[in-house]
Amino acid sequence: MTQPDGRPGTMKSLPRGGNGRELSPVVREPDDTDYGHRTFINLLATIFLLLFAIAVVWTIKAIDEQEKLGRCLDTGGRDCVQLVPPRPGVRLPR
């Protein structure tokens, strides 16, 4: 085994604490985090990101449909748009 400085030899283990001194207890400050508010904000952020992702997907699909329609019309297609006949009993404006 080698020592940390690269010399051959055995490594001596140090007592607890790494430098021979006793470890002092860790003093923590009181936790004043408002976890209810934090959870609410995280929930709002998640909802916002989900709605944003849905809007992005919808926009991409709409742009793709417009591109398909444009390509169809540019090639001289006649049936580029599906026309749905009205349901029976529905009056059309004149």
Image (spheres, rainbow, N blue to C red):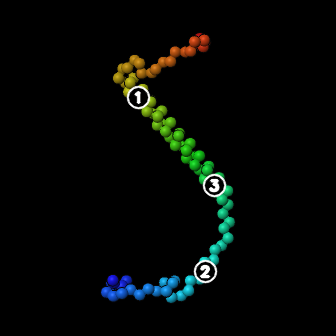
Quarter of the image for residue 5 reads bottom left
| Label number found at residue 92 | none
Horizontal placement of 11 versus 49: left or right? left
Percent of width and height locating residue 65: 44, 30
Q: Is residue 8 above or below residue 73?
A: below
Percent of width and height locating residue 53: 52, 43
The residues bearing labels 2 and 3 have C-alpha atoms spaced at a distance of 31 Å
**Residue type at tag 3:** Thr
Q: Residue at x 59, y 50 (%)?
A: 45
Secondary structure of the residue carrying numbered label 1: helix
Q: Residue at x 57, y 12 (%)?
A: 88
Quarter of the image for residue 52 reads top right
**Picture quarter with the C terminus:** top right
Q: Residues within 10 Å of mark 1 (few under 14, many from 20)?
A: few
Looking at the image, can residue 93 be seen? no
**Residue on which disc 3 sits:** 39
Percent of width and height locating residue 6: 33, 84
Please tell me which of labels 2 and 1 falls first in the chain: 2
Q: Are marks 2 and 1 in contact (CB under 8 Å)?
A: no
Q: In this rendered view, identify the residue nearer to me: 71 or 27.
A: 27
Q: In this rendered view, identify the residue nearer to me: 64 or 75.
A: 64
Looking at the image, can residue 54 be seen? yes
**Residue type at tag 2:** Pro
**Residue on which disc 1 sits:** 68
**Residue on which disc 2 sits:** 25
Please tell me which of labels 1 and 3 falls first in the chain: 3
